[in-house]
Amino acid sequence: MHMGRFNCLMQRKFRFRLEIDKELSIDCSSMEITYSELKTITRQNIDALQKYADASADYVIESWLKINECIKQLIEAAREFQLPEEEDQNEEQVWIELKRIIKETFSPVGTIYEPTDEKIKDGMSLGIESPCISDKGYEQISFFLDHLLKEKERRGWEIEFADSLTRYIKYSNEPRYLFQDSHPSNLDAAEHLALLYSLEEEFAQRNFQWKDVAEAVTPLRKEVESSRRLLEGTSRDFWSQIQVQENRMEDYKTSVDKWISQKEDSIKNLERVYNEKLALAKPKEHWDSRAKQEAKNTKKWAKCTAIVTGLAVVLSTAAIVTLYSFEMPKIPFLSTSFIAIALITFMVYLVRVFVKITLSSRHLQMAYEQKSALTYFYLSLGKHEGELTEEERVLVIQSLFTPVETGLVKSSELPDFNAALALITKRVN
């Protein structure tokens, strides 16, 4: 295809819109240009940025190189483009095919968009991630890039120009970031140079004078010294209060530990009382049961004693009357009086035996009731720590388990329970 005809079609029917990255521009809005203008701007930007691209391995010029490569591919494709003779005469058919080639060629760097000119229907938007000479602040950008070149040669640093330029434009558009990022230890070489250059510009714009700084610092230094003394006094008071609070916390900790110890002792005492209650529960039930049984026995033997006494009186009277009122056969060596006295003595002895059994039952009833009451009293005292000493506990337990005397036999005839009581005391302890 003839290049003149191709250029004419591109001029009349197609537009390009350049979208410059905000991070790499100071004041450059998007612009709509023709094909010929795109070639001119691309060439101019490559020429202007080539020296910076040679000094840096980053993407400071990469976008323009890609667009330039797309332009070359488009020119090559246009030269090779050829339609049959009958279709070549139809301009619309030719443009449809050319438009397809254009979009395929620029698709890696752009997207389709609709131009603002109503007469033109086709266009592509190209994203530029590089500086642009059409930027109103390009002179400022070029001065900064020249500064980077000088610093690279002087310091021998490896500098990423695009990263440094991004940080410089950020400071130029928003100077407040200069003070937020003013920690050189956190910055790399590119960011460090951008920060220093931006600070120099900021000071130059504000007519900065070190004399003015000295005059402003003098009263501030006095205020700092006064604040330092005040801070030292406050610090002493603060640490004094800290010490007081630490002492209070120590006292509180001591009281809490004491309270915990008391509660632990109380719990142990309750456990001991509970264990003793379990140990004495069965004996107390036995003593209560025996007390009730002996109460019944006392009533039973009391009735029997009354009956036997009555019978003894009646039988003794009848025997005496019989002996002295009637002639009874004589028994050698036994007089009537002796027989009467012997009979009365036997009856008295019999009554005395029944009385002893009754009193013994009553005595056993009272003894078992006393043991039961003493057990209850002992457990009640055991709930309070310190109520009973160890010697007193041994004495009480020995009293509880001392054998009960029935009154029918002598104490000396009872078995020795001391060894058994000592063993029981040891187990309880």
Image (spheres, rainbow, N blue to C red):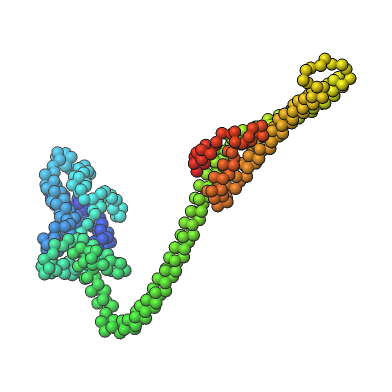
Identify whether 410 is placed above or below 258. Answer: above
In the image, 239 versus 6, the foreground residue is 239
Residue 148 position in % (x across, y down):
16, 67
Residue 59, located in which quarter of the rendered image? bottom left
Residue 228 position in % (x across, y down):
35, 78
Q: Count up the numbered dots.
A: 0
The residue that appears at 13% across and 42% down in the rendered structure is 82
The residue that appears at 27% across and 64% down in the rendered structure is 170
Residue 53 position in % (x across, y down):
13, 60
Which residue in the rendered view is the most extreme toward the right? 325
Q: Is residue 402 visible?
A: yes
In the image, 228 versus 408, the foreground residue is 408
The residue that appears at 26% across and 74% down in the rendered structure is 202
Q: Is residue 305 visible?
A: no
The residue that appears at 17% across and 43% down in the rendered structure is 89
Identify whether 184 is placed above or below 335. Answer: below
Residue 373, located in which quarter of the rendered image? top right
Residue 346, located in which quarter of the rendered image? top right
Residue 304 position in % (x across, y down):
76, 26
Image check: 113 left or right of 317? left
Which residue in the rendered view is the most extreme toward the top? 329
